[in-house]
Image (spheres, grey):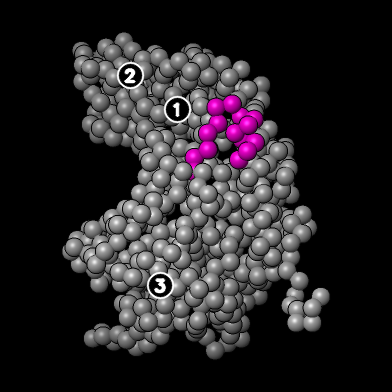
């Protein structure tokens, strides 16, 4: 696979075409707006927290395929997860995107490993991480309701 | 050749030959020859600029306007020589009217920060819906300092200025009118002469953001009769970190300094300081001497070009690329279709975000800009977050257009299967 094919894997293209958990969540307990000032992309993440778990999660906004697919994959993966595990996952994905974690070791990330293709594209790491930063802000101790990739 | 023309040097118009002067254009990117179509963001520079910069650094490096030693004399001569080149290039009437800055952004901030001090609550600054952030935010900061109002003349669906609305917004409260000569996001060429005359009729001063115009059109600040004209070195084949503010002498004389420091003073005591003459009053601290020397070399290069041929060449590329994007890329739509355009092709493709287009064409060696182009209000006007933008310089050619189209077709294949 060349670098471009690795970036635009079928799972990425699929989640871009048909993003999962896309739209507003009426009974969200946390709403976080994410902005990528590099490109002007905006997304809003809705999270419903209950008893330390992510009971429901949805997102909406505009973005490139990498950004939309990453947010879509993220919501699919963390829905139903305890917050503490979601935060651990954030760290693993962050390492994957920034190249601190080798593909081989990414096996436990399952489908999320597809995001590893951005490592060869430093300018696209921010696209892939926007949704994850919004997640961290929504479920973590940090109570800011606006995140940026800067 | 007619007798009267005998001493006029032949202006250059062999663009294929000129392309050889730009080493950056002759390299492989991802294993493919580079097709550089991001000139509106920053243009490549010719060898003569690189050599001028290198010589300044290798042999002449020293400070200007200070030393009596040989190297300082040489640096001062090179730096002030570049000022004279710029003066001639834009036809300013005096060297006092040519202020070196870091770029267009600093030039506009200088006017907003210095001239802007005379504005008060109720005064108005009129800009247009086409502006780059650098011609919006300095005026918003001025608004916060002074209570002045910021008024925006809207643009039409084709990306041209709504001149009727512009006229209606001009009035006795209008103190500053600021607009782009050529839009960076859409390529629209504004009818600057007419706009300047109308603004003057209500007693306003006019700042023209010429960053996108200077590499493509001959600019004569006296013929335009603008009060201020701002542009950047790195978009006209010179180094980054260099720019120019042209200002009418009478206005610059009246204006307070923008920054304080060395070189902008005559005398300093703890009680008071007196300021240096123009243009030094606005050049506090050691300037970007090396960069300005490079800018001077870029002006020399531009002066040797046949600008009518440059405009015709770039226009032909723009026309052809626009037609082919529409015809050959399914779902493509042009953003900005004003009758008067210069060298910018901004477009979107259904179902493929501009960033993805940019990454995919880059894998084919084609450099374009994607995003909001520092003009978010323009994007909002068209209800989009981003466009892909190909922007041309005289050194671009047919092959660059072919490569752009091929790269975009690859993006469509990847996304639509």
Q: Quadrant of residue B262?
A: bottom left
Q: Is residue B179 left or right of residue B37?
A: left
Corner quadrant of residue A150: top left
- Which residue is disc 3 drawn over? B227
Q: What chain does badge 3 belong to?
A: B
The residue tagged 1 is: A67
Residue range in magenta is B322-336
Between A97 and B303, the residue placed more toward the observer is: B303
Chain where mark 2 sits: A
Q: Is residue B28 magenta?
A: no
Expressed as whole percent of the image width and height from the top left, the position of residue B146 reads 21, 64
Q: Residue at x 25, y 72 (%)?
A: B118
Within 10 Å of disc 3 (Cα), the crowding (few <14, some 14-19, many 20+) is many
Relative image position of residue B333 (x, y in whole percent): 52, 34
Q: Residue at x 36, y 35 (%)?
A: A35
Q: In the image, what residue occupies the spot 33% across and 53% down?
A: B165
Task: Using the image, determine if residue A65 lies above or below residue B144.
Answer: above
């Amino acid at each position: 696979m060349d670098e471009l094919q690795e970036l635009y894997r079928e799972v990425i293209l699929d989640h871009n075409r048909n993003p999962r958990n896309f739209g507003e969540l009426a009974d969200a307990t946390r709403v976080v707006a994410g902005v990528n000032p590099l490109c002007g992309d905006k997304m809003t993440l809705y999270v419903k927290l209950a008893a330390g778990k992510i009971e429901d999660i949805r997102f909406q906004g505009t973005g490139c395929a990498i950004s939309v697919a990453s947010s879509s994959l993220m919501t699919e993966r963390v829905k139903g997860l305890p917050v503490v595990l979601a935060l651990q996952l954030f760290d693993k994905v962050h390492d994957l995107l920034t190249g601190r974690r080798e593909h081989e070791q990414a096996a436990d990330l399952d489908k999320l490993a597809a995001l590893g293709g951005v490592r060869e594209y430093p300018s696209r790491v921010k696209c892939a991480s926007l949704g994850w930063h919004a997640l961290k802000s929504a479920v973590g101790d940090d109570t800011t309701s606006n995140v940026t990739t800067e | 050749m007619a007798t009267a023309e005998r001493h006029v040097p032949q202006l250059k118009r062999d663009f294929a030959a000129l392309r050889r002067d730009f080493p950056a254009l002759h390299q492989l990117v991802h294993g493919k020859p580079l097709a550089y179509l991001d000139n509106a963001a920053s243009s490549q520079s010719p060898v003569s600029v690189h050599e001028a910069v290198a010589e300044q650094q290798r042999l002449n490096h020293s400070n200007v306007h200070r030393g009596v030693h040989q190297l300082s004399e040489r640096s001062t001569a090179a730096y002030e020589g570049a000022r004279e080149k710029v003066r001639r290039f834009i036809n300013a009437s005096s060297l006092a009217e040519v202020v070196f800055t870091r770029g267009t952004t600093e030039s506009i901030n200088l006017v907003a920060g210095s001239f802007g001090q005379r504005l008060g609550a109720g005064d108005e600054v009129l800009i247009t819906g086409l502006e780059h952030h650098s011609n919006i935010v300095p005026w918003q900061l001025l608004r916060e300092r002074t209570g002045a109002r910021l008024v925006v003349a809207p643009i039409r669906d084709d990306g041209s200025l709504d001149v009727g609305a512009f006229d209606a917004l001009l009035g006795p409260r209008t103190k500053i009118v600021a607009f782009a000569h050529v839009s960076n996001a859409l390529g629209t060429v504004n009818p600057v002469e007419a706009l300047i005359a109308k603004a003057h009729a209500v007693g306003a001063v006019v700042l023209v953001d010429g960053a996108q115009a200077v590499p493509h059109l001959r600019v004569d600040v006296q013929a335009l009769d603008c009060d201020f004209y701002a542009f950047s070195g790195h978009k006209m084949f010179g180094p980054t970190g260099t720019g120019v503010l042209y200002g009418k002498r009478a206005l610059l004389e009246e204006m307070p300094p923008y920054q304080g420091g060395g070189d902008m003073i005559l005398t300093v005591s703890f009680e008071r300081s007196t300021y240096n003459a123009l243009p030094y009053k606005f050049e506090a601290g050691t300037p970007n001497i090396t960069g300005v020397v490079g800018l001077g070399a870029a002006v020399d290069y531009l002066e040797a070009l046949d600008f009518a041929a440059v405009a015709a060449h770039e226009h032909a590329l723009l026309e052809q690329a626009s037609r082919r994007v529409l015809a050959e890329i399914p779902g493509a739509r042009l953003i900005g279709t004003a009758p008067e355009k210069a060298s910018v092709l901004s477009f979107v493709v259904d179902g493929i975000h501009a960033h993805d287009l940019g990454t995919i064409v880059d894998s084919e060696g084609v450099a374009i800009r994607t995003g909001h182009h520092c003009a978010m209000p323009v994007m909002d006007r068209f209800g989009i977050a981003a466009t892909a933008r190909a922007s041309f310089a005289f050194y671009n050619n047919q092959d660059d257009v072919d490569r752009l189209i091929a790269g975009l077709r690859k993006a469509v294949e990847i996304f639509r299967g």
